[in-house]
C-alpha cells in the first residue's frame, strides 16, 4: 500500500497530532468518503433544507427584511465528499481507480454548484496525507521522510499510462515544494533560492512534460502547468500562453480567468497595462459564453488586491461585463458574488487614503451597480461570498463557519442600509424565488 498507512509510525503519529490540534471541528464535520453514486443523491430535498426560511432578524435594523439564507450544507457536503473520495482511494491503494475517476470528471468538466472542478477536489484530497506529512516535517525543521516521496513515485511507476495519477503526483511535488518555503500560498512571486522548492517543482515539470493538456482535453493538467510557473525563470514570457490554454479548455470556469488576472500583477509576472490588454483579449475569446464578462473576470480579484489598479480599468466594458455575467450565468452563487463585490470590495471606505481620484471614481461606479444587482437578481443570501469580499485574494480564508456568520451579518447590514427608507417607513422588504417584493403594512 502506498497510502499514509505505509509511512513510518512517527510520521503518521505527527500527522494525526497535527490534524487534532489544527482542525478538530473540521474533522468532526467531514463526512465519510463516499462513492460517486452517493454524491448523486444530493438533490432538491437537501437544497430546500439548506435554506433558512423566515429567519428572525438579529438586530432591529434587520426588522422587516426577509431574506432566505443558504446554509453551507450542500456545497460543503459536495466538496468534502470529493476531497474524502480522493483521500480514501489513496489510503486504499486504489490509484488506478483514482486516476480514472479524475480523468472522467476532468474531461466531463464536472463541477460543484459553485463551480469548483470535481477533478481538482479529488486530486487535492488524494494529496492530503503526503502534503501534511511534509508540512509537519518542515515545521519541525526536518526534511520529509523518504517514504513520503517514494510512495508517490511508486504510484507513478505502477500507473505509467494514467495521466490522472501523473497530475496528482506532480501537484503533490509542487505542494511539497511550496511547503518548503514555509509560507503556504505566496502572495507574490517566490524567490528561486530554495533548493528543495526548486527540486520538487523540477520533478513536477518532468512528470507533466510527458503530457499535453490540450491534446488530452484536460483543464486539470493545464492548471498544473500554470502552477509550474511559480518556479519558472521564464514565467513572464509563458504566463499568457499557459493561461490561455487553460481558459480555452474550460471557458465556463471563471476561476481560471480570475487567477490569470492575479498572476499578471506586477508582483508576479506582468503589469497593469498587461492585465488590461489580456482582459480585452479574454473577453473576445470567451464572448460566446460570457459576452463581455471575460474582461470583468480577469480584473475581478485584481481590483480587490490593489484598489488603485482601477485607474487603468475600462469601466464601461467592466460594467457591461458584470451585466452580461448576470444575464447569462446569473445563478444565486454568481449574483451574491457580484453583489458582494460591488457593495463590499468596492465600498468607498474600504480603500486606502492614497487612492487616486480616477480609481475612486471608477470603483464608485462599480459600487453603484449594487442597487441593480439586488433589486433585479438577488433571491437568497450566500453569506460566504460577502465575508470573502472583505479579504485579500492572497490571504487564507478563516474557518468556513466563521465566514458564514460574519458574511450574513455584513450582508444584512448592507442590504438593510440600502433599503433603509422602505424599512423605516414600515414596509417589508422580501426576497424570494419570485424576486424582490416591497410590501406596505395593512
Image (tube, rainbow, N blue to C red):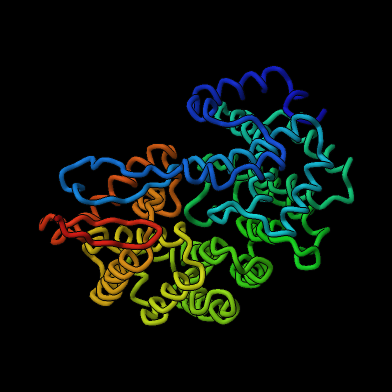
Question: Residue at the location (63% across, 56% down)?
Answer: 227
- State the residue at coordinates (53%, 78%): 283
The spot of residue 179 in percent (x, y) is: 59, 40
Q: What residue is rendered at 50% in x and 28% in y?
A: 23
Above or below, 257 relative to 194: below
Residue 79 image point, x, y percent = 58, 43
- Image quadrant in which you'd find residue 362: bottom left
* On screen, residue 308 above or below 191: below
Left-right relation of 438 to 120 = left
Quarter of the view holding residue 296: bottom left
Q: Specify whether 370 is left or right of 113.
A: left
Residue, far left? 425
**Residue 419 on image: x %, y %:** 20, 60
At 37% from the left edge and 70% from the top edge, which residue is drawn?
A: 309
Give the quadrant of residue 232: bottom right
Q: How many marks?
A: 0
Q: Is residue 182 left or right of residue 248?
A: left
Quadrant containing the N terminus in the rendered view: top right
Residue 256 in view here: yes
Q: Is residue 126 visible?
A: no
**Vertical arrangement, residue 23 with respect to residue 427, above or below:** above
**Viewer-proximal residue among 82 and 93:** 82
Across and down, in percent, residue 364 comes to 26, 71
Closer to the camera, 118 or 227?
118
Amino acid at each position: 500500500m502506498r497510502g499514509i498507512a505505509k509511512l513510518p509510525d512517527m510520521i503518521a503519529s505527527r500527522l494525526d497530532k497535527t490534524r487534532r490540534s489544527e482542525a478538530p471541528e473540521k474533522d468532526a464535520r467531514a463526512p465519510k468518503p463516499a462513492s460517486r453514486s452517493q454524491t448523486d443523491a444530493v438533490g432538491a430535498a437537501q437544497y430546500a433544507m439548506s435554506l433558512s426560511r423566515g429567519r428572525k432578524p438579529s438586530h432591529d435594523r434587520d426588522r422587516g427584511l426577509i431574506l432566505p439564507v443558504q446554509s453551507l450544507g450542500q456545497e460543503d457536503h459536495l466538496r468534502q465528499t470529493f476531497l474524502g473520495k480522493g483521500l480514501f482511494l489513496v489510503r486504499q491503494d486504489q490509484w488506478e481507480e483514482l486516476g480514472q475517476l479524475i480523468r472522467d470528471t476532468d474531461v466531463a468538466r464536472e463541477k460543484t454548484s459553485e463551480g469548483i472542478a470535481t477533478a481538482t477536489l479529488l486530486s487535492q484530497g488524494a494529496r492530503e496525507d503526503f502534503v501534511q506529512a511534509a508540512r509537519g516535517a518542515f515545521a519541525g525543521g526536518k526534511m520529509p521522510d523518504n517514504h513520503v516521496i517514494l510512495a508517490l513515485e511508486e504510484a507513478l511507476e505502477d500507473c505509467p499510462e494514467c495521466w490522472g495519477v501523473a497530475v496528482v503526483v506532480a501537484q503533490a511535488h509542487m505542494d511539497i515544494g511550496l511547503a518548503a518555503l514555509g509560507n503556504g500560498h505566496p502572495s507574490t512571486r517566490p524567490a528561486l533560492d530554495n533548493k528543495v522548492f526548486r527540486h520538487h517543482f523540477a520533478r513536477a515539470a518532468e512528470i507533466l512534460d510527458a503530457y499535453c493538456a490540450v491534446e488530452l482535453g484536460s483543464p486539470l493538467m493545464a492548471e498544473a502547468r500554470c502552477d509550474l510557473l511559480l518556479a519558472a525563470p521564464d514565467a513572464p514570457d509563458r504566463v499568457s500562453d499557459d493561461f490561455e490554454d487553460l481558459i480555452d479548455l474550460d471557458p465556463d470556469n471563471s476561476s481560471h480567468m480570475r487567477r490569470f488576472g492575479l498572476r499578471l500583477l506586477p508582483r508576479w509576472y506582468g503589469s497593469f497595462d498587461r492585465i488590461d490588454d489580456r482582459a480585452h483579449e479574454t473577453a473576445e475569446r470567451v464572448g460566446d459564453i460570457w459576452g463581455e464578462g471575460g474582461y470583468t473576470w480577469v480584473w475581478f480579484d485584481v481590483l480587490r488586491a490593489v484598489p488603485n489598479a482601477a485607474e487603468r480599468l475600462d469601466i464601461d466594458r467592466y460594467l457591461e461585463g458584470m451585466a452580461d455575467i448576470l444575464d447569462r450565468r446569473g445563478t444565486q452563487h454568481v449574483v451574491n458574488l457580484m453583489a458582494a463585490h460591488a457593495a463590499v470590495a468596492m465600498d468607498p471606505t474600504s480603500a486606502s487614503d492614497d487612492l487616486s481620484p480616477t480609481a475612486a471614481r471608477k470603483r464608485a461606479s462599480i459600487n453603484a451597480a449594487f442597487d441593480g444587482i439586488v433589486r433585479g437578481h438577488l433571491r437568497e443570501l450566500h453569506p460566504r461570498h460577502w465575508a470573502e469580499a472583505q479579504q485579500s485574494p492572497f490571504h487564507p480564508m478563516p474557518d468556513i463557519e466563521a465566514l458564514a456568520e460574519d458574511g450574513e451579518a455584513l450582508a444584512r447590514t448592507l442590504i438593510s442600509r440600502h433599503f433603509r427608507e422602505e424599512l423605516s417607513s414600515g414596509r417589508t422588504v422580501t426576497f424570494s424565488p419570485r424576486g424582490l417584493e416591497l410590501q406596505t403594512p395593512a
